[in-house]
Amino acid sequence: MDLKRIVLDLMPDVLVRTFAAPYCAGKGISSGVTKADEIHTKGGLFTTLDLLGEEVFKREDVEATVQVYFRMIEAVKDRPFVSISLKPTQLGINESEAYCQDNLRRIVAAAATHGIHITLDMEDRHFTDVTLRMFKAIRNEFDNFGIVLQSRLFRTAEDIKALHLKPCKVRICIGIYKEPADVALQDKRDMKEKLFEYVQLLLDHGHYPEIATHDEPLIRRCIDHLDKHGVAKDAYEFQMLMGVPRTEVQQEIVKRGQVMRLYVPFAEDWKYAVHYMKRRLGANPAMAPMVIKNLFGR
């Protein structure tokens, strides 16, 4: 284990909670919905709600998680500016693919009745194949279902080409999971270059890229490229994490008449928020000064 990981593991939870505050809406569904309303009212930004928590193993815990998603759907059904993200490891993949797929389908079907979009998050490389299989099976039935692909993985170009289904929303991001050199790029600059390439590849295959990055030069490069090639402004969107100080570029995107969406995590239990923040800080230590700026810069 490297020194960075050791320091994060030893960091008191109360300190992590302080750092996590700008990045996590709080505890309970109402905190996420309230934050989504605030973000939309103040800045015209869209949101995707994310229930923090991974690696659910017991059936009763999986079912409890499914019920949370049903309550989320009811809570946001009259808010067209809100979508929902979910993870296979919360919904039964540790038991079986069939069980997880059934739970995913239940949630997507419930959301479809209200026109709510659901994004299936991509976890580490061990889950890539099964996540894509489940997504394709359900996407063939429902239009309100999207997927996440990670530019760091060598396989991503082929995964885009293999999305042989109706056009869908695809969040394209670098990815938070550190992967070995035999399956993934190791240099962030290379990952960002691939992200840029994959935006166009997704468009070429009829999909709707959700460009998830905080890198302002990369955002502007994408905008310039897509404008130059006459891509309609409603054919793609940008996404960022809530709490990262990028207000200026976010408002520029909104003024262009485009969707700018923030990822809004909330927790049913604060231990999940702590785990989330430690992982984010471990993957990107540069986030710490960003949080400090948010907390004290004003």
Image: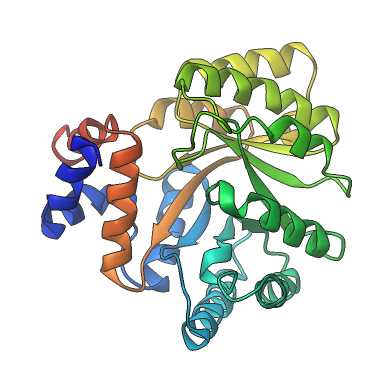
> Which quarter of the picture shows residue 101?
bottom right
Q: Work out which quarter of the rendered image holds the N terminus and state it.
A: top left
Confirm whether residue 122 shows in the render: no
Q: Measured from the top left, where is residue 283 in percent x and y? A: 35, 38
Q: Is residue 130 above or below residue 245?
A: below
Q: Work out which quarter of the rendered image holds the C terminus and state it.
A: top left
Q: Residue furthest front?
A: 182
Which residue is drawn at the image coordinates 60% and 54% (left, top)? 127
Number of residue marks: 0
Q: Nearer the viewer, residue 145 or 174?
A: 174
Confirm whether residue 214 shows in the render: yes
Q: Nearer the viewer, residue 58 or 236?
A: 58
Which residue is drawn at the image coordinates 47% and 49% (left, top)? 263
Q: Measured from the top left, where is residue 35 in percent x and y? A: 39, 58
Q: Is residue 65 above or below residue 220?
A: below
Which residue is drawn at the image coordinates 55% and 61% (left, top)? 87
Q: Measured from the top left, where is residue 268 in percent x and y? A: 36, 73
In the rendered view, does 60 fall on the left or right side of 80? left
Q: Measured from the top left, where is residue 143 in percent x and y? A: 81, 59
Q: Is residue 183 above or below residue 267?
A: above
